[in-house]
């Protein structure tokens, strides 16, 4: 008598879940990385974006000279020289650079090129159309502001520290005042100077002959309706500042802006003397 043969239904194969889980996990990690990366770049862009220089300046600014936007966000020597020569009338642009470096008391390669960006603006107001067009009169009676874009704020602050050390070595007394989030450094006593006051604010290092000018700029932030940027004639000028031109000059009608331009030229040609 033969034994019966045991037969049965073959067992159903187990689902291969490993590959599916791996794919899903990989997609999840990739999506998370993309979202985190996008969040970082949004934070970086918004935290590094500066207000337009004209948004910090009063509406009655009479003279405004600026480099055109730079694609690389770094100053180009030929562009700076062209603006100094064509918009201000400086015959020897290199003399201005040498004078500025000497006045600041810093090293050009180690203390300036490490942070300075493509935004450079000088703005003037406050002189009437009568009187001499001299640097001395501009510093005593008018208001001049230099705005230099920073692409690296820690390096810009290091430059300020180096500059403070140079000022201390010269015997200058520098005090500090906190205005909002900005620390304004101001020279006590001494002769009028285009760098009597300075601050790092909104990713700019700002120099002026008057600390109250910088304090007003800090207060101006967020009130663009009352700024130079809101003046229709300036807005039209600013639209023409493209990468195709080195820079430009905006000025109001009348003698005051012409006097200020000549006084600014005198000031720049005698920096560091």
Image (cartoon, rainbow, N blue to C red):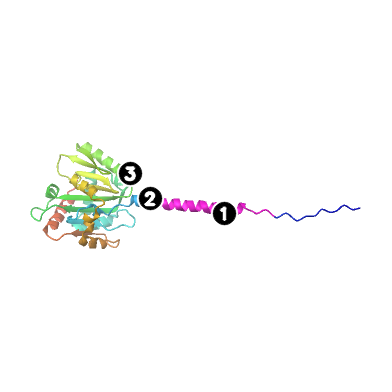
Nearest the viewer among 37 and 149 is 37
- Alpha carbon separation for disc pair 2 and 3: 18 Å
Would residue 72 appear left or right of 133 to someone viewing this image? right
Would residue 139 appear left or right of 82 to someone viewing this image? left
Query: Can the viewer see residue 65 in this picture?
Result: no
User: Would you name the residue on which mark 3 appears?
Assistant: 154
Q: Which label sits on residue 23?
A: 1
- Alpha carbon separation for disc pair 3 and 1: 43 Å
User: Would you name the residue on which mark 2 appears?
Assistant: 43
Nearest the viewer among 82 and 146 is 146
The image position of residue 273, as x and y in percent, is 17, 45
- Which segment did they paint magenta? 13-42
As helix, strand or loop, the secondary structure at mark 3 comes to helix
Q: Residue at x 59, y 54 (%)?
A: 20
Q: Is residue 35 found inside the magenta-colored segment of the image?
A: yes
Q: Quadrant of residue 5?
A: bottom right
Mark 1 neighbour class, 10 Å CA radius: few under 14, some 14 to 19, many 20 or more: few
Above or below for 192 versus 252: above
As helix, strand or loop, the secondary structure at mark 1 comes to helix
């Amino acid at each position: 008598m033969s034994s019966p043969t045991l037969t049965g239904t073959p067992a159903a194969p187990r689902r291969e879940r490993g590959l599916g889980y791996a794919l899903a996990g990989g997609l999840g990690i990739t999506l998370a990385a993309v979202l985190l990366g996008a969040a970082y770049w949004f934070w970086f862009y918004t935290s590094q974006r500066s207000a337009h220089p004209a948004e910090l300046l009063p509406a009655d600014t009479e003279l405004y000279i600026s480099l055109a936007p730079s694609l690389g966000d770094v100053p180009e020597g030929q562009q700076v020289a062209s603006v100094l020569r064509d918009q201000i009338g400086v015959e020897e642009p290199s003399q201005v650079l040498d004078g500025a470096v000497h006045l600041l008391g810093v090293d050009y390669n180690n203390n300036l090129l490490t942070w300075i960006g493509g935004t450079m603006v000088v703005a003037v107001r406050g002189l009437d159309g009568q009187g001499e067009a001299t640097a001395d009169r501009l510093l005593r009676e008018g208001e001049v502001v230099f705005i230099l874009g920073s692409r690296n704020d820690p390096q810009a602050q290091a430059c300020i520290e180096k500059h403070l050390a140079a000022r201390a070595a010269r015997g200058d007394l520098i005090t500090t005042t906190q205005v909002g989030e900005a620390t304004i450094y101001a020279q006590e006593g001494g002769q009028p100077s285009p760098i009597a006051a300075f601050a790092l604010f909104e990713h700019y290092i700002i120099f002026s002959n008057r600390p109250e000018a910088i304090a007003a700029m800090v207060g101006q932030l967020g009130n663009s309706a009352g700024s130079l940027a809101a003046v229709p004639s300036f807005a039209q000028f600013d639209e023409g500042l493209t990468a195709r031109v080195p820079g430009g000059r905006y000025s109001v009608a009348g003698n005051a802006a012409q006097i200020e331009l000549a006084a600014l030229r005198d000031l720049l040609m005698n920096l560091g003397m």
